[in-house]
Amino acid sequence: MIDQKLSDFLYKLKLPFLLVFLMWAVKLYESFSLSKLSRHGIYPREWDGILGIITGPFVHSDYEHLLSNTVPIFMLSAVVVYFYRRVAVPTLFLIQLLTGFAVWLFARPSYHIGASGVVYGLVSFVFWSGIFRRNMKSIVLALSALVLYSGYFHGILPTKDGVSWESHLFGAIVGIFTAFLFKGLKEDDEIVENPWEEDETREYFLPRDTFDMTKKERAYQAYLEKLRQAENTDDHWTDSSTLL
């Protein structure tokens, strides 16, 4: 049982590991090939720069930049994959695609690289999922994201040169949109069984509409039930006498 749970847990972490692996593989290739890959980032309103929507999040300026995104991208994508399994892949896809497209449309004319836009999108998704879904699991995750990543909020403002605050801002907005879009797709542990829902395969001590009736209606139903029982008893004795 423990081995099975561990296997399932590791299986769900395949996507977070893959994202981190691609980020590091790109950086190591850049270092060993002595090439500069920043041109593969998003360059707003230039057709050559639109491909950066796909490639830009995996390109980083230096190892410090890469390290600053490695832990949050792994942790947040793991949270989404583990706790929101049904929507994990489309969530990651939409956050990257829509954030990158918004940057391409509205950001400054410069190469925008790095996974921070995706990170901000995931933080926003986890937080706002708690607001929209309103169940215990999503609320706890939202509060955890608020505590752990509250320092990220200043990153949506143009306070530091050389930082793509546009990616942060649009990532946060896309995260809200994605959380709202998928709020109705409940996970298995979020579906609460209604104890009053009719189930034809089960037997009930009282009729399911007992508490929907008035006292007089219940008395009348009880009277009809006694009549039916009396009729059944009479039929029984009639059938028995016929057999004798």
Image (cartoon, rainbow, N blue to C red):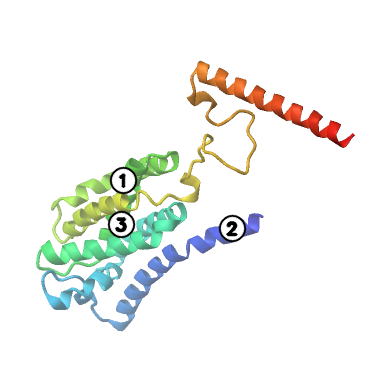
Identified by mark 3, the residue type is: Val
Residue to which mark 2 is pinned: 6
Asked if the residue under mark 1 is in contact with the one under mark 2, i.e. CB atoms within 8 Å, the reply is no
Judge depth for marks 3 and 1 and give the one in front: 1
Q: Which residue is at 58% across, 30% downward? A: 207
Residue 112 - label:
none
* Secondary structure beneath label 2: helix
Circle 1 Cα neighbour tier, 10 Å, few/some/many (<14 / 14–19 / ≥20): many
Q: Closer to the camera, 16 or 131? A: 131
Q: Closer to the camera, 218 or 94? A: 218
* Secondary structure beneath label 1: helix
In the rendered structure, the answer to whether residue 202 lies left or right of residue 215 reads right
**For marks 2 and 3 on the same chain, the one whose residue lies earlier in the sequence:** 2
Q: Quick check: 54 above or below 106?
A: below
Residue 119 - label:
3
Q: Which residue is at 55% across, 31% downward? A: 208
Residue to which mark 1 is pinned: 128
**For marks 2 and 1 on the same chain, the one whose residue lies earlier in the sequence:** 2
Q: Residue furthest bottom?
A: 33
Judge depth for marks 2 and 1 and give the one in front: 1
